[in-house]
Image (spheres, helix red, strand yellow):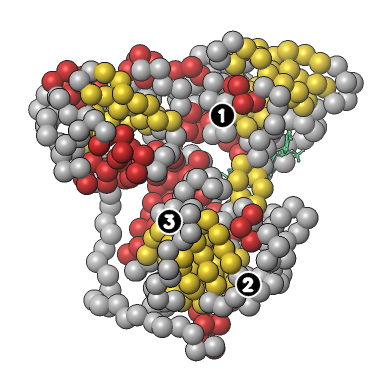
Amino acid sequence: MAAGAPGPVENLVIVGSGPAGYTAAIYAARANLSPVVITGFKDGGIPGGQLMTTTHVENFPGFPDGILGPELMDRIKAQAVRWGTRLVEADADRIDLSQRPFRIEAEGRTIETQAVILATGASANRLGLPSEERFWNAGISACAICDGATPQFRDVELAVVGGGDSACEEAVYLTKYASRVHLIVRGDKLRASKAMADRVLANASIQVHWNRQISDCSGGDWLEAIELRNSVDGSSERLPVRGLFYAIGHTPNTRLVQGQLETDAKGYLITRPGHPETSREGVYAAGDVADAEWRQGITAAGSGCQAALAAERWLTEHDLAVTVSHDPVDPVEVGERVRTAVSDEANFNPEALWQKGSFALRKLYHDSNKPLLVVYTSPTCGPCHVLKPQLKRVLDELGGRALGVEIDIEAEQEIAQQAGVTGTPTVQLFLNKELKQQFKGVKQRSEFKAAIEALL
Ligand code: NDP
């Protein structure tokens, strides 16, 4: 489909919504550049980036007790929006840097912009096992933090593959649920930071298998075992596990600018060392898309700041910026997020658009004749953070003609088991006690809306 005609030329479009993208947005918005952030949706992971699929971030300055990755991202995003960043919550479909202003297609329209910051991050790699597709979401997962709490992974043996910080973090995290965690490491040492590696090696519930490559996996409807090959002596063994979690590094998301900007052999954008300028004037890189080495939330945020300052300087030098002034000068405070209380007899409201817990679920399931969205989440699931506001918006737009209930599968395991939930987020759409449709993972708002409208 051809994208619609462009509107006025933007000063700066930032592609990507991890710590790099949103930090760039905070700086650009405060410089009155009124930046646009194309947050991404599915391409290259999820909006918010890799911190959305991590648990406690304990090394981001300013949070002495640590903070959950998704919560940190919610805060950085809120800060960017507070200062006037405009969001396009979709994937960029095309980026054309061959002419000025640059042109970016997203959400069916073309956005023209004087400057671009690419902060598209990197995506999780897969092993590409022969049976991978068959067991994807049926034992194999790319996100222990999202899926670990699901009933199928409780009190069984699980495996994590990888030897970096992600693998170690996930292995430790999964010991909360598993009877035993096997960490499959292809070499003879862990690449993870010392603190993280020590935690793994000291944990009696984790067994490290050194020098092992996974060659395939097997099972019936659900994963039952993985095949390991010993890379030292060439021997093979079968390891019975009910879950396999991938944590084997990332590939930079540079597909949309391939051939337009200089990249290295692995696809990372090449910038002048210590500077955000790419090989094309007016185009800057921030975060993991140009950083194969440090890859931390704080270094991504720092490089987002550099990119915004460099873009601002360049736009000013070339007299290209059309600045907007803030009125009032200081925007209103964002404040702390108010959490929905779990419903009980006392606070249950049959008309409330969004409630929480099994009490509300039972009441609405039995007594309501409206379409009911049941949203299964877990506390650390980043994609759930992305999805919930989208669903709330759909319910808002439908003005009370459909209702939503959130079930925390960590707190309400039995319900999750009965519902056959295998990962979070899972959304089930009911009408008059009948399951009409099920959605796994993050989907576009329009998909949910269309499914509900078809029932009205
Ligand atoms: P890394 O690239 O650091 O590690 C990837 C791991 O996967 C390596 O151990 C690598 O093995 C292994 N691997 C790669 N391909 C394969 C394969 N085909 N088969 C088997 N094993 C494979 O990625 P991470 O996601 O762990 O970390 C990325 C960045 O994020 C790092 O900078 C890390 O420090 C940071 N991070 C920080 C966290 C924190 O501080 N809380 C949490 C998570 C990540 P090999 O070592 O042999 O190359």
Residue 414 position by quadrant: top left
- Look at the picture and state if 315 lies above or below 352: below
Residue 426 position by quadrant: top left
Label 2 packing within 10 angstroms: few (<14), some (14-19), many (20+): few
Q: Distance of mark 1 from mark 3, alpha carbons?
A: 29 Å
Question: Regarding ligand 1, which quadrant of the image does it lie in?
Answer: top right
User: Under tag 1, what secondary structure?
Assistant: strand
Q: Is residue 335 left or right of residue 90?
A: left
The residue type indicated by label 3 comes to Glu
Q: Which mark is residue 98?
A: 2
In terms of sequence position, does the residue under pointer 3 or pointer 2 come before the other? 2
Q: Are marks 1 and 3 in contact (CB under 8 Å)?
A: no
Q: Circle 1 is placed at which residue position?
A: 141
The residue type indicated by label 1 comes to Ser
Q: Residue 22, how many percent across, how many down?
A: 46, 61
Q: Is residue 375 left or right of residue 179?
A: left
